[in-house]
Image (cartoon, rainbow, N blue to C red):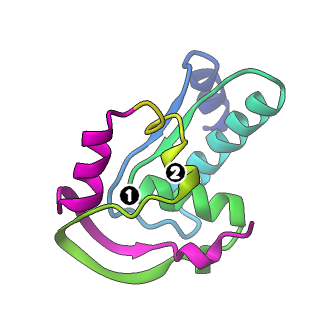
Amino acid sequence: TFSEAYDIFNSINGLLFTGGAADLNGTVFFNTASFLLHLALQANEDGNYFPVWGTCQGFEIINVVISRDIKILKAFDAENISLALEFSEPGKQSRMFKYAPPDVLRSFETMEITMNNHRFGIEPSSYKE
């Protein structure tokens, strides 16, 4: 229930939405994830640092909830493929990569070392400045 989810939210210090292949269209799973994400957004707006991380489908959940549009997800042919990363300048300055050693960043940018197994994703053009 949402009451139980609220109680759990108040006992944790961050959200991790993992990957998977669950249906996101109006399911209990999606509705609960949306509820928790809104609580996290409110906590951050209130000045309480509450990190949220989404991997693969978790990233899709965050984008669908924020955009309020399931159609933001586009079909991608990226199953069982390793790729190099293309960093944006804000990405390089993010908390995750800002202090990474240059050789680590160079490896991510030049070597096909990130595992991708995606049927859906979000086009970079979906984001507004």
Question: What residue is at 60 percent from the left and 61 percent from the top?
Answer: 63
- State how many labels appear: 2
* 49 on left or right of 60: right
At mark 1, the secondary structure is loop
Q: Position of residue 74 (x, y in %)?
A: 48, 82
Asked whether 89 or 8 is in front, the reply is 89
**Which of the two discs, 2 and 1, sits closer to the camera?**
2
Stretch in magenta = 100-129
Whether label 2 touches label 1, CB < 8 Å: no
Q: Quadrant of the C terminus?
A: bottom right
Asked whether 115 or 29 is in front, the reply is 115
* Relative vertical location of residue 126 with respect to residue 91 in this rendering, above or below: below
Residue at numbered disc 1: 56
- Taking the view exactly as shown, the residue that stands out farthest to the front is 102
Q: Position of residue 110 (x, y in %)?
A: 23, 61
At mark 2, the secondary structure is helix
Q: Give the residue type that dot 2 points to.
A: Gly
Question: What residue is at 60 percent from the left and 32 percent from the top?
Answer: 5
- Residue 114 visible, this angle: yes
Residue at numbered disc 2: 91
Question: What residue is at 61 percent from the left and 65 percent from the top?
Answer: 64
* Relative vertical location of residue 7 with respect to residue 72 in this rendering, above or below: above
Q: Position of residue 16 (x, y in %)?
A: 45, 37
Q: Is residue 2 magenta?
A: no
Give whichever of discs 2 and 1 has the lower sequence position: 1
Q: Quadrant of the N terminus?
A: top right
Q: Rounded to the nearest whole Å, what is the CA distance between mark 2 and mark 1?
A: 17 Å
The label shown at residue 37 is: none
Q: Position of residue 105 (x, y in %)?
A: 32, 46
* 42 on left or right of 15: right
